[in-house]
Amino acid sequence: MARVLIVGGGIAGDTLAVYLERDGWEVVVTEIAPALRAGGQTVDLRGDSAEVLDELGLLEQARKRLIPQRGAAWIVADGRRLAEMPVTAFDGQGLVSSEELLRTDLARLIHDAAGPGVIRRFGETVTALRDSGSRVTAEFRSGDAEDFDLVVGADGAHSRVRALRFGPEENYRRPLGLAHAWFTLEEEPATPKLDGWFLLCNVPGRRALEARPGHPGQQEIGLTFAADTLPPRDDREAQFALLEQIFADAGWRAREFLDAARKAPDFALDTYDQVHMPAWHDDRVVLVGDSAWCASPLSGLGTALALRGAAELTTALRAANAPADPAGIPAALAAFESAMRPRITSAQQLPPGRVAAVAPESMLGIRVNAWIMRAVQTRLARPLVARAMAGTEHHRPAQTP
Ligand SMILES: Cc1cc2nc3c(=O)[nH]c(=O)nc-3n(C[C@H](O)[C@H](O)[C@H](O)COP(=O)(O)OP(=O)(O)OC[C@H]3O[C@@H](n4cnc5c(N)ncnc54)[C@H](O)[C@@H]3O)c2cc1C
C-alpha cells in the first residue's frame, strides 16, 4: 500500500488525511502540538468550504456549529458606533455572514472524520527529508526514519517542510505590515456582552481591538497593530510586554483584553504575511495550505483554500491512479499545482486599501473608513458593490478580524 506522510494536522492536513485514507492510502500525520490545536476565530462556510465539506459528508454537521451573529460594527474608544454592517448586507455576502463557525470546531469536525487507518503522531515533526530511489526518507525528531511514497507539508505559514525542501522562510514570506494577537476570553458577570455583534474598535496609531461572538460564555478577541517582526514565538513574556506597550493606553476594553490574553490557553500572536512560491512541489514532496500559499487572514480565504487544496490534491492523485500506482505521483503533483495556481493568484490580490483599512493611522482615517462602510450600504451604492463582490468571490473578507 502506498504511504503518505502529512506533516501538520491542521485544516489542510487533516482534510487530506480523510480523503487519502478513504482512497486506500496508508496515512501518517505528524503534528507538532501535543494534541489537536484549538483556537482561532470564526471561519467562513461559504463557497469552497461548503463544497468540500459537502463532498466529505461533513457540511450538515458543520452547519450545526454555526455561531449566531448579527453583524459587524465599527466603534471608537468610548464605545460609540460609527458604522454597522448587519449579516443581511449584500444578500448575506458582506463582512460577517450567518454562515460562520469557529476554526476550533471545524478543525475538530475534520479531525474526528478520519478513520482508524490514519496513524497520528502528536508532538512529532520531521527533521530531514532525503530522496531514496522512488521514495522519500523522512527523519523524525524522535530519531526514527521511515520511507514514504509522498510527503505533504501542511504545517502552516511557518512550514518546516518548506524550509527543509525549498529553502528559508525569508525567501517566500511577504509581510503585510500588520501583526495580530488572538485568544478566547471567558466572560464574567461584569463582561460587556456582544449581543451577536463583532465589534471593531480602531484607535489612532494603526491599532485595532476586536471582540467577536464565540461559544456561549466566551468572546474571541483580536488585537491588531503595525509590525513586520515580532519577539520569538516561544517568548510569551516578550510578546505580552509588546502588547502592553502598544495597547495599554488604547482605551475601550484594552485593559480587560490584555489581562485576558495572559490567562488564555489558546493565545497566539503572528504577523499578517503572505507566502509566494514559484513552485509548491519537488519530486514527491508537496506543500498544501498556508505553507504553500498563505493569502493572509486579510484575504478571508485561508480555510477555504486549505480545504480546496486538499480536495484538488486528492483529485490529481486519483487521476494518476495513486495509491495503486505510485509511479504517477510526481506528475500528479504538477497537475495539482496547475489546477490550484489561478485560484491562489486571485486570492492573494487583496483589494486596494484593504491593509490600511484594518488599522488606520489617524482619527480622520478611522472616520473615513467608517463613512465608507456606511456609504457602500446606501441604496445608491449597494447594487454596484454587490456586483463587484459577485465578480470577486475570492476577495470576500468574512474571516478577517
Ligand atoms: C490555532 C490556530 C488558530 C488560527 N486562527 C485563525 C483565525 O482566527 N483566523 C484566520 O484567518 N486564520 C487562523 N488560523 C490559520 C488558518 O487555520 C489557516 O489560514 C487555514 O486554515 C489554512 O490551514 P493550514 O492547515 O494550511 O494551516 P494551519 O491551520 O495553520 O495548520 C497547520 C498545522 O501544522 C502544525 N505544525 C506547524 N509546524 C509544524 C511542524 N514543524 N511539524 C508538524 N506540525 C506542525 C500546526 O500546529 C497546525 O496544527 C489559525 C491557525 C491555527 C493553527
Image (tube, helix red, strand yellow):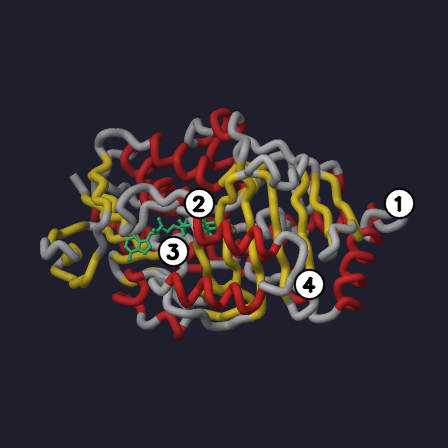
Tag count in the figure? 4
The crowd level at tag 1 (other Cα within 10 Å; few <14, some 14-19, many 20+) is few
The residue at label 3 has a CB less than 8 Å from ligand 1: yes
**Mark 2 residue CB less than 8 A from any atom of ligand 1:** yes
Q: Which of marks 2 and 1 is in front?
A: 2
Q: In which quarter of the image is the N terminus?
A: top left
Closer to the observer: label 4 or label 3?
A: 4
Q: Residue furthest left?
A: 144
- Residue 231: % across, % down: 41, 70
Q: Which mark is residue 39?
A: 2
**Would residue 46 be seen by someone viewing this image from the given angle?**
yes
On residue 156, the disc is 3
Q: Which of marks 4 and 1 is nearer the N terminus?
A: 4
Look at label 1 and name its amino acid: Arg
Q: Is residue 211 left or right of residue 82?
A: left
Element at label 2: loop
Asked whether mark 1 lies closer than 8 Å to ligand 1, one says no
Q: Residues within 10 Å of mark 2 (few under 14, many from 20)?
A: many
Give the residue number, with chain letter if any, for mark 1.
379
Mark 2 or mark 1, which has the lower sequence index?
2
Identify whether 20 is placed above or below 30. above
Write down the residue under mark 4.
203
Hey, which quadrant is residue 355 in on the image? bottom right
Amino acid identity at mark 2: Gly
Give the amino acid type for the residue marked by disc 4 in the picture.
Answer: Val
Question: In x, y percent, where is residue 60?
Answer: 50, 25
Residue ID at (45%, 37%): 106
